[in-house]
Amino acid sequence: MDNIDTHPLNGLVESIRLHLIESRNTNLSQKNKMSYNNFIKIFKRILSRYKTNAFGSISQNTTDSLIEDIENTNPLMEREWLKQITLNLKTSLNQ
């Protein structure tokens, strides 16, 4: 990731967030909206950790607490994927 702040993922995540906030779509249940919002919050935290690690360093405790939050947040879509990319970050700390 050359410049994490301008990476296309940031724009996509923000688009999803704005759509959920501004959406009057009644086909999307409150539980699904909450699941998306929780996903976005945690995904942004993961991106922030990757950025911090790229330009400095983060502690194992930071990734451990993030994994714990992933496990305890409900509802949350793509829980296993979020956990896996966080574990990948944690593994990269050991190298």
Image (tube, rainbow, N blue to C red):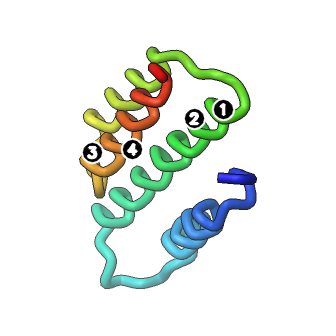
- Name the kind of residue labelled 2 in the image: Arg
- How far separated are the C-alphas under marks 1 and 2? 5 Å
Q: Is mark 2 on a helix, strand or loop?
A: helix
Which of the marked residues, 1 or 4, is nearer the chain's N terminus?
Answer: 1
Q: Is mark 1 on a helix, strand or loop?
A: helix
Q: Are marks 2 and 3 in contact (CB under 8 Å)?
A: no
Q: Is residue 61 above or below residue 40?
A: above
Q: Is mark 3 on a helix, strand or loop?
A: loop
Q: Do the residues labelled 1 and 2 touch (CB within 8 Å)?
A: yes
Q: Name the residue under label 3.
A: 74
- How far separated are the C-alphas under marks 3 and 1? 26 Å
Residue 55 location (% of width, % of height)? 72, 32
Q: Is mark 4 on a helix, strand or loop?
A: helix
Residue 95 location (% of width, % of height)? 48, 23
Q: Which marked residue is nearer to the observer: mark 3 or mark 4?
A: 4
Q: Mark 2 points at which residue?
A: 49
Q: Mark 4 points at which residue?
A: 85
